[in-house]
Image (tube, rainbow, N blue to C red):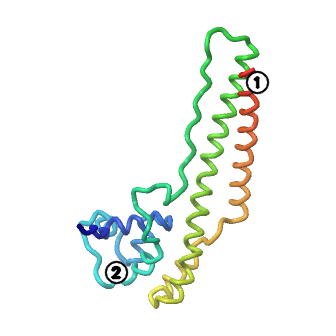
Amino acid sequence: MGRTPPRAGYMLADLRRYFGLPQWEVAGLLRVSEDYYRLLELEKRTLNIRQMGRILPLLQAVPATLAAHDRELWEPSPPALPVAVAVSGTASPYQNAVEGRLDYCRHTAWKLRLAAHTYAVQARVAARWAEALPTLRATEPFYSEQGVAEWLAAREVALSPTALSKWHLLLARATGLDAEAAELTTLLGA
């Protein structure tokens, strides 16, 4: 029994996710309206030969091993929400304060990791562009045309120094709060 080939609409949506592109940008690359592009993704319209020629080099840059349903391969998962500390029976005011601080540390660390997640996704998309751009520029005449060449030049191939600093600062703050939460958990367990 043979495997069903991937459908064009799914491939276009996968391409957009992989390179972090909004629908309007891919529509511009194909030189169609955004509404028409939506119909392409929904498979209510089909790509013609010229449009396929424009998008094929980008599609070839997407690894064949990726599956649309496997979110971990597309982008890192956001962190899981921490579980609050269960308070049992009557506790001393000191224990309540420690439990409150523990809850604060866990939730704040989670929020910081969630904010850092945005930068992780941006870094992954930039790395994908850095890998694909040399091939696109070298092999395809369409990608050297005036408007398309400018579009390719605007692709980020690395995080900006500011974004990289923010990403590392958010992760460092979350790690510090995790260490404090571990100490508070030990204190409560004693």
Residue 177 in which image quadrant: top right
72 to 9, vertically: above or below: above
In which quadrant of the rendered image does the C terminus lie? Answer: top right
Residue at left offset 68%, top offset 54%: 167
Neighbourhood count class around disc 2 (C-alpha, 10 Å): few under 14, some 14–19, many 20 upward: some
Q: Is residue 181 left or right of residue 10?
A: right
115 to 86, vertically: above or below: below
| Secondary element at tag 2 | helix
Q: Position of residue 55 (x, y in %)?
A: 40, 78
Q: Position of residue 188 (x, y in %)?
A: 72, 22
Residue at left offset 75%, top offset 38%: 179
Please state which amino acid type lies under the numbered disc 1.
Answer: Leu
Residue 97 in which image quadrant: top right
Q: Is residue 119 left or right of residue 32?
A: right
Residue 127 in which image quadrant: bottom right
What residue sits right under mark 1 in the picture? 187
Task: Tell which of 23 and 90 is nearer to you.
Answer: 90
Residue found farthest to the front:
1
- Residue 51: assigned label: 2
In which quadrant of the rendered image does the N terminus lie? Answer: bottom left
Q: Is residue 154 left or right of residue 56?
A: right
Residue at left offset 49%, top offset 89%: 139
Report the Cα–Cα distance between label 2 and label 1: 64 Å
Neighbourhood count class around disc 1 (C-alpha, 10 Å): few under 14, some 14–19, many 20 upward: few
The image shows a total of numbered marks equal to 2
Upstream in the sequence, badge 2 or badge 1? 2
Q: Position of residue 129 (x, y in %)?
A: 56, 73
Residue at left offset 73%, top offset 57%: 165
Please state which amino acid type lies under the numbered disc 2.
Answer: Gln
